[in-house]
Image: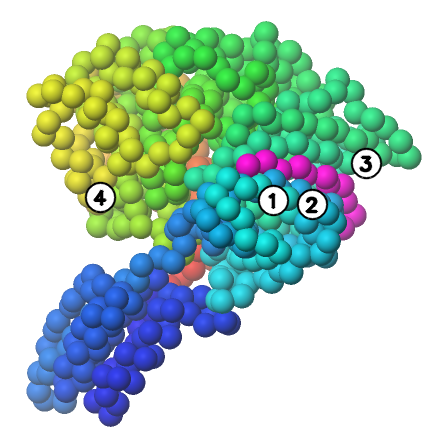
C-alpha cells in the first residue's frame, strides 16, 4: 500500500498531481492499485479535499476512511486517512496482456535444454487472432527472458519493447509489447516468432544436479507454471482466461527422456550427435499455467488402459504399485461428469523438491513422492488431480480471483470419488477433516483478511501469496450448501450440465451463478442463497453438517486420550489413515486451545502414544507431518530435529511451511529453524523458497 502523507504546507493541487502520478504510473514505474492519503490537524482537511478531487476526476474511488484523535503535545488533534483504489488498467489482475484485443490461438515451441547453463534456449511461434477492430500490437507477459529477435510471418523484424509504460513489477514481471506492423480487423490472424532464452533463476524451472536425484547419475529438470510462472518459460498471455493449443519440440542430452503436458507425436525420439529430440501435440486448448516440461532419467510402467506412471528407475516399482487405482478414479469421473477429453492420463512422480501434492497438467499429472506410503493410502491426491480433468483443465476459472471455480469444484469432486469407493460415511469424514485444515489457514491469515474471501482482490499481487485451502474447501462448502438445498441427485445432474456448458471455456463466479440459477429456475429452494456473503465474505464459511460414524470414532478416541488414556495398537485396527490424520488434528487443536499445564500434560503422553500407535516410525508423510506438528505444539523439543529433517527433505509446501512455522513459534527454536532453512534453501523449488522467506520475515518482524 502506497501512503502519501499530507502536510498543510502544500495545497490540494500539489497532492492531487502527486497522487495521480502514483495511480497512473510513469515510464519507469508501474501504477499503484491503491493509495492512502493521510493528514493530521489542519492537513486532515487537505487530505479530504485531495481525495474528493481524485475521485471527481475518475482516477480512483474512495474505498476506506479512517479517523482518529491522536495526542500531539498535550492536545488531541484530528487525523484522517483516506484510501483510494484505482481501476485496474488491464483485463486480468495478474497479467499485462491485452487479450481483450487479441488472443493467442496456438503456439509452437522449439527448445533445447542446457543443463550446463541452467536455461532453455529456442523460440516460440504464436498464432494470434484479433478480437477487436484496429489492433496493431500484442502485449505478452514475460519475466527475465533474454529476447534476441522478434519477427513476423514473412521473417521481417518487428519492433518491440520490454517493460515500457511502467509495465514492470516484482509480482508480474515485464510486459513484452510487440508491434505487428499493421492494424488488424476483428477476426484477422497474425504470426509472431520470438527467439529467446530463459533466465538461470527462472521461478518456473528447477534444475537438479545428479546428486539431487535418486539415481545420482543424471541431471533432472521440471517446471511449475501455476499460477503466473509460465511467463518465465515463454512469452505468453499468462492468464487462465486465454486457452491455446500447442506443439513442441524439445532437444535434450542423451540418454535423458523429455515429457510434456501433451501427447507424444512419436513412440521413440529422434537421436543424433548425443542428443534426443522429442515432439508433442496438445490438441485441446489449455491456459498457459498448464504447460509443463520434465526431463531426466525416466522410465514408465503401464498402470491402466490409458495410463502410465513415470519416475526414475529406482522408484518405478513402488510408484506402479501405489497408483494402480488411477483407472478407477477416471471411470468414476466419467460417470459423474461425462467424457474424458484428454486421451491419455499419465503420472510423473517427481523428486522431493516438488512444491505441491500434485499438479494437474493435462495428459501428465505431476505428483510428489510423499504419496508413496506403500499401501495406496494417500491416493486421494490422484483422485483430486483426476477431477481437474473436468474442473480446471476443461472448465477453467477466468482469473485467479475466482480460483475456487477450479479448486472448490475439484475438492468437492475428489471427496465424491473417494466416497463412491469407500462409502458416503468416508466422504463425510473427508469433509470434516478438510474443514479442520481450512480453519487453520483462516486463522493463519486472520478471519478478516482479504485472502480468506472466496473471490479475493488480487490486482498486482502474485497469486502464490494468496495460496491456501480457502479456494479449495470454502469453495467445496458452497457446493455442499447448494447440494443440500436441491438434493444430491439433482445437484449431480447439475454438475454434468455445468461441464457440458463450460467445457473448453473460462468462467467467473457470475457465470457460475447465472447458469446455476437458470438450471434451477423457479425452484424456491435456491432463491435465498446469499451469494454476496459466499463470494465476498471473509473468514470461515457456513460449516457443513457432517454425520460420520468414522469421525465419531475419532472423537471418542481423542476424548479418551485427552482424558489420560495411554492408547493401544488395537485402537486403530480397521481405521482409514484419514481417521488417524483427523485424530492428530483433534489432539493438536486441544493443545492449541489449552494453557501451559495442558501442553505439559500432553507432552508427557507423547512417548506412550508413539509406542502404542507407531507415530515416530510411520512412513505415511501425512501422519508423520501431523505427529511432529503436535509434538512441537506441546513444546516437545526432543522431536524438533525430526521436524527439521522432514522440513529439509520434503519440498512440498503443505508440509514444509507449517513445520517451519511450528518451529518458529516454539520457544527458542526460531534461530535453529532459520539455520536449517538456509542450509536447505538451495534444494528447495524457487516457489517454496520464496514463500518460506516471507514466513521467516513475518516471524522475525
Question: Looking at this view, is 161 or 418 the one in front?
Answer: 161
How far is the residue under mark 1 from the one under mark 4? 40 Å
Residue at disc 3, secondary structure: strand
> Residue 56: x and y, percent?
20, 70
Q: Quadrant of the N terminus?
A: bottom left
Tell me if label 2 and label 1 are in contact, CB under 8 Å.
Answer: yes
According to the picture, the residue beneath numbered tag 1 turns out to be 190
> Residue 395: x and y, percent?
41, 27
Q: Is residue 206 left or right of residue 50?
A: right
Does residue 679 lie above or below 85 as drawn?
above
User: Looking at the rendered structure, which numbered label has been put on residue 153?
Assistant: 2
User: Looking at the rendered structure, which numbered label has been put on residue 253?
Assistant: 3
Examine the image and state in which quarter residue 324 appears: top right
Residue at disc 4, secondary structure: helix
Residue at disc 2, secondary structure: loop
How far is the residue under mark 2 from the one under mark 3? 31 Å
Within 10 Å of the Cα at label 1, are there few (<14), some (14-19), or many (20+) other Cα atoms?
Answer: some
Does residue 670 lie above or below 453 as drawn?
below
How far is the residue under mark 4 from the one under mark 3? 50 Å
Amino acid at each position: 500500500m502506497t501512503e502519501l502523507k499530507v502536510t498543510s504546507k502544500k495545497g490540494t493541487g500539489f497532492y492531487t498531481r502527486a497522487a495521480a502520478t502514483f495511480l497512473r504510473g510513469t515510464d519507469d514505474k508501474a501504477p499503484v492499485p491503491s493509495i492512502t492519503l493521510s493528514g493530521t490537524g489542519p492537513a486532515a482537511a487537505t487530505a479530504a479535499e485531495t481525495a474528493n478531487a481524485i475521485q471527481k476526476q475518475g482516477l480512483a474511488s474512495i474505498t476506506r476512511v479512517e479517523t482518529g484523535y491522536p495526542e500531539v503535545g498535550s492536545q488531541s488533534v484530528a487525523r484522517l486517512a483516506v484510501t483510494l483504489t484505482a481501476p485496474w488498467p488491464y483485463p486480468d489482475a495478474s497479467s499485462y496482456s491485452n487479450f481483450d484485443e487479441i488472443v493467442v490461438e496456438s503456439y509452437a515451441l522449439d527448445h533445447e535444454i542446457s543443463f550446463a547453463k541452467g536455461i532453455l534456449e529456442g523460440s516460440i511461434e504464436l498464432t494470434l487472432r484479433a478480437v477487436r477492430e484496429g489492433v496493431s500490437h500484442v502485449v505478452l507477459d514475460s519475466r527475465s527472458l533474454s529476447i534476441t529477435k522478434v519477427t513476423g510471418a514473412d521473417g521481417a523484424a518487428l519492433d518491440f519493447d520490454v517493460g515500457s509504460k511502467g509495465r514492470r513489477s516484482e509480482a508480474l514481471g515485464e510486459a513484452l509489447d510487440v508491434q505487428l506492423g499493421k492494424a488488424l480487423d476483428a477476426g484477422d490472424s497474425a504470426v509472431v516468432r520470438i527467439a529467446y532464452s530463459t533466465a538461470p533463476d527462472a521461478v518456473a524451472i528447477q534444475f537438479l544436479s545428479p546428486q539431487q536425484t535418486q539415481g545420482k547419475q543424471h541431471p533432472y529438470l521440471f517446471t511449475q507454471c501455476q499460477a503466473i510462472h509460465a511467463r518465465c518459460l515463454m512469452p505468453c498471455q499468462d492468464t487462465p482466461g486465454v486457452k491455446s493449443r500447442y506443439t513442441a519440440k524439445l532437444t535434450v542430452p542423451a540418454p535423458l527422456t523429455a515429457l510434456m503436458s501433451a501427447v507424444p507425436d512419436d513412440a521413440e525420439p529422434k537421436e543424433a550427435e548425443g542428443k534426443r529430440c522429442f515432439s508433442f501435440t496438445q490438441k485441446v486448448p489449455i491456459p498457459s499455467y498448464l504447460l509443463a516440461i520434465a526431463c531426466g532419467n525416466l522410465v514408465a510402467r503401464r498402470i491402466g488402459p490409458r495410463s502410465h506412471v513415470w519416475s526414475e528407475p529406482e522408484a518405478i516399482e513402488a510408484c506402479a504399485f501405489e497408483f494402480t487405482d488411477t483407472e478407477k478414479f477416471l471411470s468414476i469421473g466419467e460417470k459423474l461428469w461425462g467424457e474424458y477429453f484428454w486421451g491419455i492420463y499419465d503420472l510423473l512422480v517427481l523428486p522431493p523438491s516438488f512444491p505441491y501434492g500434485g499438479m494437474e497438467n493435462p495428459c501428465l499429472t505431476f505428483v510428489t513422492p510423499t504419496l508413496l506410503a506403500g499401501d495406496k493410502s494417500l491416493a486421494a491426491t490422484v483422485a483430486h488431480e483426476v477431477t481437474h480433468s473436468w474442473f480446471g483443465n476443461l472448465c477453467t476459472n477466468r482469473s485467479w480471483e475466482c480460483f475456487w471455480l477450479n479448486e472448490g469444484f475439484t475438492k468437492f469432486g475428489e471427496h465424491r470419488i473417494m466416497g463412491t469407493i469407500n462409502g458416503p460415511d468416508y466422504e463425510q469424514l473427508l469433509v470434516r477433516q478438510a474443514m479442520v485444515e481450512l480453519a487453520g489457514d483462516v486463522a493463519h491469515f486472520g478471519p478478516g483478511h482479504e485472502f480468506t474471501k472466496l473471490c479475493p482482490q488480487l490486482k498486482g499481487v502474485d497469486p502464490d501469496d494468496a495460496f491456501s485451502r480457502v479456494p479449495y474447501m470454502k469453495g467445496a462448502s458452497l457446493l455442499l450448501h447448494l447440494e443440500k438445498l436441491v438434493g444430491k441427485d439433482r445437484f449431480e445432474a447439475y454438475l454434468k450440465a455445468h461441464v457440458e456448458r463450460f467445457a473448453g471455456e473460462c468462467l467467473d463466479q457470475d457465470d457460475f451463478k447465472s447458469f446455476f440459477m437458470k438450471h434451477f429456475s423457479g425452484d424456491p429452494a435456491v432463491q435465498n442463497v446469499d451469494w454476496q456473503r459466499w463470494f465476498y465474505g471473509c473468514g470461515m464459511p457456513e460449516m457443513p453438517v457432517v454425520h460420520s460414524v468414522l469421525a465419531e470414532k475419532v472423537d471418542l478416541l481423542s476424548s479418551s486420550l485427552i482424558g489420560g488414556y495411554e492408547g493401544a495398537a488395537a485402537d486403530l485396527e480397521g481405521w482409514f489413515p484419514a481417521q488417524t490424520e483427523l485424530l492428530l488434528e483433534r489432539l493438536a487443536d486441544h493443545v492449541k486451545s489449552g494453557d501451559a499445564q495442558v501442553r505439559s500434560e500432553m507432552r508427557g503422553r507423547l512417548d506412550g502414544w508413539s509406542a502404542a500407535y507407531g507415530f515416530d516410525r510411520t512412513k505415511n508423510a501425512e501422519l508423520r507431518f501431523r505427529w511432529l506438528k503436535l509434538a512441537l505444539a506441546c513444546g516437545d523439543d526432543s522431536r524438533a530435529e525430526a521436524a527439521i529433517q522432514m522440513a529439509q527433505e520434503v519440498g512440498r509446501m503443505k508440509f514444509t511451511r507449517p513445520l517451519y512455522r511450528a518451529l518458529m513459534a516454539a520457544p527458542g527454536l526460531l534461530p535453529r529453524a532459520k539455520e536449517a532453512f538456509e542450509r536447505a534453501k538451495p534444494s528447495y523449488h524457487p516457489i517454496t523458497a520464496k514463500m518460506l522467506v516471507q514466513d521467516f520475515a513475518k516471524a522475525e518482524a
